[in-house]
Amino acid sequence: MALILIKKLGTRINKNGKKHSYALFLCTFCNEEVEKRLDHGKVCQSCGCKKGELTSISNTGKKRTDEQRQKISELKKGKPLSEKNRKGISEAHKGKKQTEEYKQKMRDIMKGRNSGKDNPNYGNGDKVKGNKNPNWTNGSSFEPYSPEFNKDKKQQILERDNYECQNPNCKKLHDKLHIHHIDYDKKNNGLDNLITLCHSCHAKTISKKNRNYWTSFYLRIIKNKCL
């Protein structure tokens, strides 16, 4: 169903100097009057209120070519999904079982992603685990914390730091706070070696090449706090 023509409004000159005929149309979906170019209004099915739904209906049963899929993928790359889209995708996949073919395809895609610099995708966002990771520190991150580093100790540091990230350059508000070992020694749980950091600031300390910088940076802050 197209828009209903109410009356013609004459011609207008656009910014490119071209003349176009305009008219007033009635949308049969929302009963709103809308001005459109005469040629556009005659083929439009709604004023825009049903654009997404009508497009979806018109595309039902149509198969996209590989070229179209690639173009759509590039256009959507980096764009966050809206809550409505997430809910729609979740509902569409609810109750569906993954076929063995699909599972094997995903295994093939993930295979080799953790193989280090020999992997052609190295440095392109794929995670590289183990001793081939540039931040590898001989497995120190897998060492257990000492029993002294318990809930009471963490609570003591949080209260001392007023439940705030102690990086003076931090401008973000995070609900998730971490207790960071300044010298990266998990067994050193002295009050002058523990500091409260938000999730974002704590993540910045992970890089192996910047550890000396962050150690001296946070040691100065703790010394000033204790003075």
Image: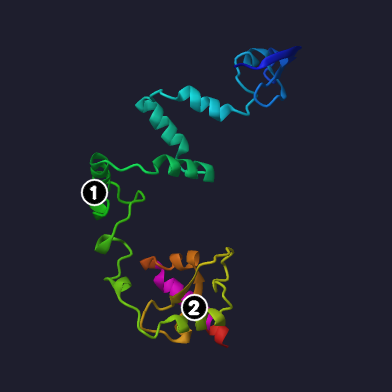
Q: Residue at x 30, y 51 (%)?
A: 122
Q: Kindly identify the amino acid type of the residue bearing the numbered disc 1.
A: Lys
Foreground: disc 1 or disc 2: 1
Magenta region, residue range:
210-222
Does residue 178 appear left or right of residue 65 in this picture?
A: right
Circle 2 is placed at which residue position? Answer: 195
Q: Tell me the CA gap for discs 1 and 2.
A: 39 Å
Q: Is residue 139 above or below residue 41?
A: below
Looking at the rendering, in which quadrant would you find the N terminus? top right
Residue 10 seen anywhere in this rendered image of the structure: no
Looking at the rendering, in which quadrant would you find the C terminus? bottom right
Please say whether residue 212 is one of the residues in the magenta stretch. yes
Q: Residue at x 36, y 24 (%)?
A: 65
Residue 69 position within the rendered picture, expressed as x and y whole percent measured from the top left: 39, 30
Badge 2 element: strand
Q: Residue at x 63, y 27 (%)?
A: 48
* Sequence-wise first label, 1 or 2: 1
Q: Main secondary structure of the magenta part?
A: helix
Label 2 Cα crowd, 10 Å radius (few <14 / some 14-19 / many 20+): many
Residue 101 seen anywhere in this rendered image of the structure: yes
Q: Is residue 219 above or below residue 46?
A: below
Q: Kindly identify the amino acid type of the residue bearing the numbered disc 2.
A: Ile
Residue 45 position within the rendered picture, expressed as x and y whole percent measured from the top left: 60, 19
Q: Which label number is shown at residue 177? A: none
Circle 1 is placed at which residue position? Answer: 111
